Amino acid sequence: MRSVEDIISLLGGPDMAARRLSIGTEALRKWRQNGAIPSRHWSLILVLTGLGLGDLPGAANPTSGGAAPICGGNALQEIPMSDIPEGATAALVLADGSVFWGRGFGAHG
């Protein structure tokens, strides 16, 4: 499992991570403080970093009978920023590696 700091580094540092995930740097501070990343960000982080679900702090290890892996247990290739559609705030990642971009919605916690 990677640390929150490792994930932020893989995303290009705090400012770039905030931009790539469409969140504020205050959210990153809370991630660091809690030592975990909220699940609503996992799918996009997996796509952007090429990590597997088991690498994310706060995610169940998919091989231990916990949550089913979003990516079929396989890490995805990193997607360049230029390939992410403008305005996309969410990604649906299927087990076959297909990625569908859209806008996230729902209650804010």
Image: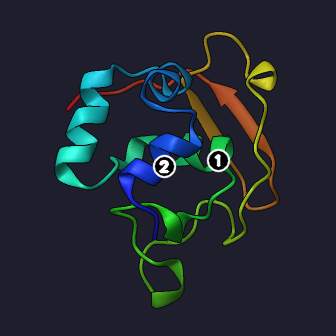
Q: Quadrant of the C terminus?
A: top left
Residue 81 at x, y = what percent?
A: 73, 24
Q: Is the residue under label 1 in contact with that under label 2 (CB below 8 Å)?
A: yes
The local crowd at label 2, few if under 14, some if 14 to 19, many if 20 or more residues have their Cα within 10 Å, is many
Location of residue 45 with respect to 72 vertically, above or below: above
Q: From the viewer's perspective, is 88 left or right of 66?
A: right
Q: Amino acid at mark 1?
A: Thr
Q: Amino acid at mark 2?
A: Ile
Disc 1 marks which residue?
Answer: 49
Residue 9: numbered disc = none
Disc 2 marks which residue?
Answer: 7
Residue 13 or residue 63, whichever sits in front: 13
Toward which corner of the image does residue 53 lie, by quadrant? Answer: bottom right
Residue 80 at x, y = what percent?
A: 78, 30
**Which residue is painted at 54% across and 23% down in the image?**
89
**Which residue is painted at 46% across and 71% down in the image?**
1
Q: Indicate the secondary structure of the residue bearing disc 2.
A: helix
Question: Looking at this rendering, what residue extends furthest in the bottom direction?
Answer: 64
Q: Indicate the secondary structure of the residue bearing disc 1.
A: helix
Residue 42 or residue 3, whichever sits in front: 3
Toward which corner of the image does residue 76 lie, by quadrant? Answer: bottom right
Residue 92 at x, y = what percent?
A: 64, 41
